[in-house]
Amino acid sequence: MTTRKIAFTVNGEKTQLEVDIRESLLETLRSRLNLTGVKKGCGAGECGACTVLIDGAPFDSCIYLAVWADGKEIRTIEGEAREGKLSRVQEAFLSEAAVQCGFCTPGLIMTTTALAEGGQSYTRQEIRKELAGHMCRCTGYQSIVNAAEKALAPSPEEDRDCCGKCR
Amino acid sequence: MYDISKYEDAHTVEEAIALLQANPRAVVISGGSDVLIKIREGKLPAAELVSIRGIEELKEIKLEGDETVAIGAAATFTQLTRHPLISRRLPLLTEAAGLVGGPQIRNMGTIGGNVCNGATSADCAAPLFAFNARLRIQGPEGIRTVAIQDFYQGPGKVALGHGDILTAILIAREDYSGFSGCYIKYAMRNAMDIATLGCAAAVRLRDSRVEELRLAFSVAAPTPVRCPQTEELAKGRTVDGILLADIGRAAVSEVQPRDSWRASREFRLHLAEELSKQAVAEACRRAGHESDRESDEEGDGEGGAEK
């Protein structure tokens, strides 16, 4: 068994691990760090259930080797709520009924969060394209796109209180 | 767990070549979106990997002397869709790169991997053929440049020896300047799919006539192909429905698609005719020309092939 030491940040916490060179980041997050909010759907980069943010961009962690995470900042769904308060994206998914079984939800929220933090605005069609790496068996996608639209729309009250740096 | 028995990092191209030469079983890994899937499918048992992910020079997109666009082989599809050099000079490639897989895949897959897999279905292939791209390859014997049309040798086969590394894809000014292009990826899904047929058209107009046409297809033959006879017949012609119809018919004669589970040969021939008309029409519109709607005997021009 060949292993390598990696040092990376997960949901803001600096972490050092010895990982198997055969291991995917998905396996590392779920099995070594107990971040089971990251879901294994297809294991082949086709469904997006395992999507996490790596240095702010969405990746399928099932086809991302653990050794590649060295030096990177990883964000999973577990890190999105702050002190029990859901993020704006999470709230939007709930208020728009975009969550049914919830299996696709963590991945979708991570991708939508990356879009929200990027500061760009998107048409509905562009949102659909940005979320095209995710499959949902339950909702039929409309509520998900509605939630993303809501999360990406500018919010006057929030902008007044929030500097935006942590979102 | 992926069935990987060895993993080595190369920090320079020279080191990668040396690691490959030292190990006849070693396989290059860059983005990983193809290699890891191959490993998952059992096609690379006990895989021994040489990673080129850390070689910074391979990720650069820049202009070389005489305004040749040099795209580092390790540039990701996302990088291609965002880089101003590409969007300004090679928008056809921006369009194609933005249609590969989905956003997550585009964040990791590279144009070098797309080309080196030798798949006829690579989305970047038809545009690169249209641009007469040349590939810079570094190997044990040194550096050489290969025309992309010579690089593809057959399905899954490319002119890359064991110790070779594709370092950059080069597109000369005369092959992109003044051209407007359009890439159409016909697939069963709007994303996360492999092309059933891909069509890249690039056109340079002068006084509303075609000065030069480049037409290339993916999945229409064992390798991506250009259509030289179709390109020739378009020279000097006015852009109208008659030209588009002629282009469609001529394109069909220059492709040899096969039956596959995705589509029959007949359907692909139909797609070749339709997509070439649509892609050329759109390329001309983007060149600032308002052409007639392509001549359309059946009465239903918007067959959804543009999705």
Image (spheres, rainbow, N blue to C red):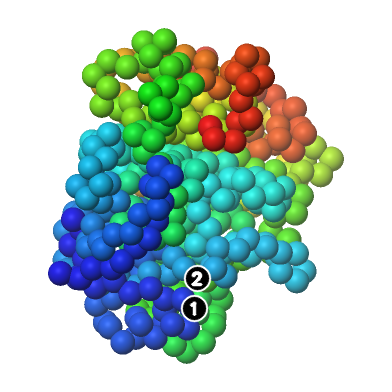
Q: Residues within 10 Å of mark 1 (few under 14, many from 20)?
A: some
The circle drawn on residue B233 is none
Q: Observer-nearest residue: B15 or B17?
A: B15
Query: In this view, which residue lies farthest toward the front?
Result: A83
The chain under label 1 reads B
The picture places residue A35, in percent across and down from the top left corner, at: 27, 40
The picture places residue B65, in percent across and down from the top left corner, at: 75, 71
A107 horizontally vs A156: left or right: left
Q: Identify the residue at horizontal 40%, vertical 27% (top origin).
A: A83
Q: Identify the residue at horizontal 84%, vertical 40% (top origin).
A: B207
Q: Residues within 10 Å of mark 2 (few under 14, many from 20)?
A: some
* Placement of B279 over or under A44, stated as above or below: above
Residue under label 1 = B12
* Placement of B166 over or under B251, stated as above or below: below
Q: Earlier in the sequence, mark 1 or mark 2?
A: 1
Residue under label 2 = B55
Query: In this view, which residue lies farthest toward the bottom?
Result: B141
- Secondary structure, mark 1, is loop
**Is label 1 on the same chain as label 2?**
yes
Amino acid on which disc 1 is placed:
Thr
Confirm whether residue B230 shows in the render.
Answer: no
Q: Identify the residue at horizontal 54%, vertical 29% (top origin).
A: A116
The picture places residue A67, in percent across and down from the top left corner, at: 33, 61
Q: Quadrant of residue B180?
A: top right
Q: Identify the residue at horizontal 26%, vertical 82% (top origin).
A: B24
Counting every numbered tag in the picture gives 2
The chain under label 2 reads B
* Placement of B181 over or under B301, stated as above or below: below
B152 horizontally vs B25: left or right: right
